[in-house]
Amino acid sequence: MPFTPLKSSSLPPEIELPEFVLPAVLPDDIGALKSLLQAQQDALANVRQQAMREAHNYIIRMIEQSVLARHRLFGASSEQLSAQGRLFDEAETLAASSTEEQDVAALPEVVPASTAPDEKAPKGRGKRGPLSPALKRVDVVHDVPEHERTCPCGTPMVEIGQDVSEQLDIVPMQVRVLRHIRKRYGCPGSVHAPVTAALPPQPLPKSNASADFLAMLLTVKYVDGLPLARFENILERHGAPVPRQTLARWVIGASHLLQPLHNLMRDALLDGAVIHMDETVVQVLKEAERKASTQSYMWVQSGGPPGKPVVLFDYDPSRSAAVPLRLLADYRGYLMTDGYTGYNKLAKVDGVEHLVCFAHVRRYFVEAVRVQPKGKRGRADEAVDLIGKLYGIERTVKDATDEDRLLARQQLSVPALAALKAWMDKTLPTVPPKTALGKALAYMDKYWDRLVRYTERGDLPIDNNRVENCIRPFVVGRKSWLFSDTPAGAHASALIYSLVETAKANGLEPYTWLRRVMRSLPMAQTVEEMEALLPWNLQNLDLASETVA
């Protein structure tokens, strides 16, 4: 049977066939010649089998990539309303899942005082909670007509009580003008120069934007994700047109005013024992010597001492390793990241201990599960289950002290990690490296020493989810405003996102905190006065009680 050699042109581009060349001088012995030809034929057969295996693996990888791409486009999401496609039918979708009782129910029943503190009362189905007591109440009194207040027996009725139901109301945004009237006093005889009342320091002295207006401007853009063009339309609808170019200048001017707070927050960040770090893309249109389509980056860090959580955004056009080296040049402690190699140089600095995120490992295995045949359990499921045990341990000690958490990790997590390592060592040699499961195994094997380090202490994180949750509001806003026009705008956005996300991390409502800062920061003269405005030094109740003087 003739042997037909494979043509390299029919194989995937990464598969190459070696060339077999017959010797220049053939042996005279027929037996030796047959042996030579048989060896050549066996070698070609082996190459053909190898090429077929490579081609098979190549087809498997293409199928896996197709399945994953289809899932990203059309697959179910864990979010209730996923992606932009659900925005238009949002009202219908949510209304379909609500009940009539949720719209008309009275306040929840009061839990009897005899209920033990540690016993959780069952939550009533279809019941809503009361409206916030902090909201202003306006009484609308409905009285019984006078001719109906006479009893059938002829006796006039007397008031014996009332029924109260509450309804949520809203007053449209008010846009007003603050007139600063500065009294002037002069000498009756005009001998001396007159005296005029001083104007208190303003956030942007050469603009006509008040402190409260700037606080609202920053809130709608950086908390609510509203582009300046839309806010311009809202202001015009309320009879106060302000061009978006002016709004942009005010945003950048406000960022310059807020820079000292950003610096103080960085000092607090570097004082923490652990810093989470990640990066995400951002587009800047007008950057020197760069195309408008070029991707730039927001580098995000989260950490800080106990009770002082900090979130910092920093803009940089580069994703090189020099950026984290610059941002955390003075930091010594634990650094939690994903597997991006750009953090390796920082991890080699003396005093920096590198941790790698276990959530990223789990995502690789989840992708491997998705490409398995439906209804069949594979080796990727085993990895997801083993990693799930680690997270189950973390959930049980979420509210424990660092000492108790460390003890639980040593007693429970370390053996679970050993079982996962044994499974990985057994499975890794048997899986093609370029398949979804092979990539997941290779990733976990590569970073294993840094994945397990979280068990060294009780205060170390198992993953990088903390900073990824901080990035999410930025990503949601980016879907609306799409890009920054200039590097100055990108730097301003980074600074303001840092402030509002740090305020949220400290449990503050961003607008009320920004309002206090915009009113007080222009008058702050010392570091102590500026530190008093940091989010962990203020309380929501104090901020909400403030009114315009």
Image (tube, helix red, strand yellow):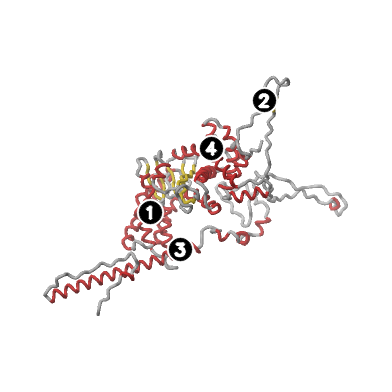
Residue on which the image places disc 3: 69
Residue nearest the observer in this picture, 121 or 361: 361
Res 6 → quadrant? bottom left
Q: From the image, state whether disc 2 or disc 3 is nearer to you.
A: 2
- Pointer 1 or 3: first along the chain: 3
Mark 1 residue element: helix
Instruction: Name the amino acid, label 2.
Output: Val
Residue tagged 2: 195
Residue count near mark 4 (Cα–Cα under 10 Å), binned few <14, some 14–19, many ≥20: many
Mark 2–mark 3 distance (CA, rounded to whole Å): 73 Å
Tag 4: amino acid: Leu
Q: Nearer the viewer, residue 185 or 54?
A: 185
Q: Residues within 10 Å of mark 3 (few under 14, many from 20)?
A: few
Residue 416, numbered label = 1
The image shows residue 548, relative to residue 368, as above or below, that is above
Pick whichever of labels 4 and 3 is earlier in the sequence: 3
Q: Is residue 533 above or below residue 287?
A: above
| First along the sequence among labels 1 and 2 | 2
- Nearer the observer, disc 2 or disc 4? 2
For marks 2 and 4, the one nearer the N-term is 2
- Disc 1 to disc 3: CB gap under 8 Å: no
What's under tag 1, amino acid-wise? Ala
- Camera-near label (4 vs 3) is 3
Q: What secondary structure is found at the residue carrying circle 2?
A: strand
